[in-house]
Amino acid sequence: MISKKNFEKKYEYGFSKPNDYEFRSKKGLTEETVREISKMKDEPEWMLNFRLNALKIFKSKKLPTWGGDLSKIDFDDIYYYLKPTKGKSRTWEDLPKGIKDTYDRIGIPESEKAILGGVKAQFESEVVYGSLLKKLEDQGVIFTDTDSALKKYPELFKKYFSSVVPANDNKFAALNSAVWSGGSFLYIPKGVKVELPLQTYFRINSSKMGQFERTLIIADEGSQAVYAEGCSSPMYSEDSLHSAVVEIVVLKGARVRYITVQNWFSDVYNLVTKRAVAYEDSVMEWIDGNLGSKLTMKYPSVYLMGERAHGEILSIALASNGQHQDVGAKVIHKASNTSSIVNSKSICLNGGKTSYRGLVKVNRNASGCKVKVNCDALILDQESRSDTYPKMQIDNRHTKLAHEASVSKLNSSQIYYLTSRGLSEEEAASVIVSGFIEPILKELPVEHAVELNRLIELEMEGKVG
Amino acid sequence: MQENNKTTKTILITNENENIEILKDSIFNYLWIGKDNQKYKGNLTIFHNIANTKSNISIKVVLYDNSSFDLEAIVHISKGAIGTDTYLKVNALILSNYATIKVEPSLEILENDVKAGHSAIIKEIPLNEIYYLMSRGLSEEEAKSIIVEAFINS
């Protein structure tokens, strides 16, 4: 078993660079903070009112009592807005050296060389680096940070902003609505197919800082896009809060795949609301990898609003020492002949805890729906814990639902077989775990798959099944 | 394990909340048939507190008319209950446009040397099964009742 000290030494993305902040809001959350954020960003009146209203909702809602332990979050001990450098840079050379060094270690230039759509890097609370392939601009694709989108495309923005996740949806959606900054805005025009995955790198780089990104994706009729979001956050000693909202609108016949690999360091509370609405004949896919963090509560959801829409949620969760991954999936069938697939894999080790919390709902007026849910868990040692809470509510008889869950340890006969073929027990365990997550890994873009595999191998080091 | 050391029970669901502690290898078959305005809402909790026991739980639900069924079934494997082997199965057949079902088959596992699983299947009677029986001379009602009987007894 890896001791924590040992592990920290090995944690390759754990580093923190000093930063000069152009602006830093006062700690704590008051009306004044919210007004200040809105003023700093020079926002229209309606957005300020939206934020203030959300703040009221946030204050009135109680913390959820289910899921993970949230009682240790001190909302008065958090910076709600940080602005690192002036404006945004277009090219790599223009970036300040400290930020460049940090990115060099995650390998952003390589990603760019690999011609991956537009690389948008989120450093602190705002996008400071963005480059966009000319090809995308020519197709009419809008890919920018959410703050710029509010200024440049006010009508499109106002039409869809908060239409999927209203401020009163839950306490953390309200918090995000009140203090959001940064995030990505993506609009794909009618019939446009974006072939390259659009990528964003998120990083938190200051202790006691909350990140409240707001991402809005609109796929117009018949369009297609893949959006990939990856995180690897450096180490801190103090708790940090990350509460993002992701809204996706998939219009008639469109297809969106949203890929996330999150690897927060073990101090971070990651409380995210992710939701998509899918209209007629559209396809929405969430692919979600959760590693690290102290507590992750994330349930990507798909509302199937139009006939024949299809939703798919694939996820991997890995919880190690002191970590709780409370993740799952929600699918609401609101229209006839819609279908959905949920496939969840979780691994817990070194005293980690994984929970699958899911909801499948078929409304009375939705006929002929098909649902398949599959959740598998691996428990690698005696200190770890795995829970499964899948809710199913079926109000229409013409439904086909199949759900299956299994929990097991590493299969000893498989380990014997592999050791008889010359592998060490540790290697054998690692091979079996790789095989366990393979169905989801193969859906990820190659850099994410490699990174995820490497991180799981790192966690598995010294582990014998 | 000797055969006579096993508990096999077929139970009609009546209790609203039921807690069962598994002390030896057990098979439980639950059945609920809802008619008219019958409503069921309850919890079933299966505890595995001791080592090396097996449990196999089957819950069958048939829904007619305006009936509704709402069950939270938890299998809890406590620390120390190594060698537990448990499987919980929910099978539901919906026969009416107005019936509703809500199930949450949960697992809480605090030990790693175990096997645990559950499955849920919710569907209506496939039309081709009814057509097949009707092509053999049965009325639609007869065909349905045979399929329901087979579902309950399988």
Image: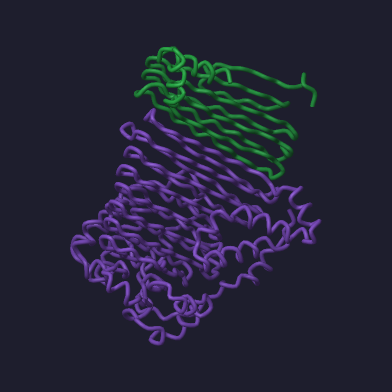
Q: Colour of chain B?
A: green
Task: Determine whether A399 is above or below A222 in the image.
Answer: above
Q: Residue at x 52, y 27 (%)?
A: B91
Please state if A64 lies on the left or on the right of A351 as rendered: left
Image coloring type: by chain
Quadrant position of residue B90: top right
Quadrant position of residue A304: top left
Relative depth, front residue between A240 and A284 = A284
State which quarter of the image contains the N terminus of chain A: bottom right
Relative depth, front residue between A351 and A459 = A459
Task: Determine whether A201 is above or below A168 in the image.
Answer: below
Task: Determine whether B8 is above or below B121 in the image.
Answer: above
Q: Residue at x 44, y 34 (%)?
A: A400
Please state if A25 lies on the left or on the right of A404 as rendered: left
Q: Colour of chain A?
A: purple
At which x and y percent is residue A225?
36, 62
At which x and y percent is residue A338?
36, 41
Relative depth, front residue between A244 and A347 = A347
Please state if A40 lies on the left or on the right of A259 as rendered: left
Task: Determine whether A92 is above or below A297 in the image.
Answer: below
At which x and y percent is residue A278?
33, 49
